[in-house]
Image: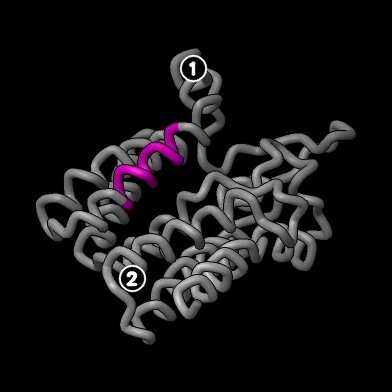
Amino acid sequence: MRDVLLLVVAYLLGSVPFGVLVARARGGVDLRRVGSGNIGATNVLRAVGKGAAALTLLGDIGKGAAAVGLGRWFSVSPTVLAMIALAAVVGHLLPVFAGFRGGKGVATTLGVILATMPAVGGLLLLIWLAVAAIWRYSSLAALVASAALPILAWLLDGRPPMVGLSVALLLIVLVRHRENIIRLRQGTEGKVGQRVKTSNGQIVK
């Protein structure tokens, strides 16, 4: 029963839509009607600005780390810990507090990986930053970092539940980024910080 409750709490933590809340508070913007409609930090950056995006990123990373930290507090097994991490990411993808319209899970994935496998999480962050700085595509950075995740988990951690978690998270990122992959191939993907239009045609930062 304890483990089930922890999974529910992890899902609820993941469901907190920081992007929606921050965009509304800082810019009076309905994030789901701007740009890509995504509730993550990249869309917040385009719609509201750097400060709001940073708050969203920290919130989305933090809720994933907090869910895993709760599991560690109760000394759950690696298998349950991996399930808790996955539940937090699913909460971000399908948030009960935002009509089950969530983000793509990249920042929350980083949060759970930093909390379960700190060395792997640190390397993923460096990979994301490097790719984003060079090519200026947040989606490409997420895809490259996610592709490296199972390999790094196997090399640096090796626990089967964590390797399995890494594969599951990679598959989630690939599915959630399928439209981005098409746009990347077509050369129409928006770059980091690029201005976007609202549903009524107004240009926002």
Residue located 33% across and 77% down the image: 76
Magenta stretch contains residue 85: no
Q: Amino acid at mark 1?
A: Gly
Q: CA distance from mark 2 to mark 1?
A: 35 Å
* Tag of residue 115: 2
Q: 145 or 166: which is nearer to us?
A: 166
Classify residue 69 as left or right of residue 105.
left
Residue 97: x %, y % from top left = 74, 61
Classify residue 129 as left or right of residue 188.
left
Q: Earlier in the sequence, mark 2 or mark 1?
A: 2
The residue lying furthest to the right in this view is: 200
Q: 158 or 24: which is nearer to us?
A: 158
Q: Amino acid at mark 2?
A: Ala
Is residue 111 positioned above or below 152 on the image?
below
Residue 77: x %, y % from top left = 28, 73
Classify residue 161 as left or right of residue 112.
left
Graded by Cα atoms within 10 Å as few (under 14), some (14 to 19) or many (20 or more), the crowding at tag 2 reads many
Magenta stretch contains residue 166: yes
Graded by Cα atoms within 10 Å as few (under 14), some (14 to 19) or many (20 or more), the crowding at tag 1 reads few
Residue located 33% across and 70% down the image: 115
Residue 164: x %, y % from top left = 28, 49
- Read off the residue under disc 1: 187
Residue 199: x %, y % from top left = 84, 34
Residue located 40% across and 42% down the image: 142
The residue lying furthest to the front in this view is: 1
Is residue 154 positioned above or below 2 on the image?
above
Residue located 63% across and 46% down the image: 43
Q: How many marks?
A: 2
Q: 15 or 49: which is nearer to us?
A: 15
Q: Secondary structure at mark 1?
A: loop
Q: 134 or 7: which is nearer to us?
A: 7
Q: Bounds of the magenta span?
A: 165-174
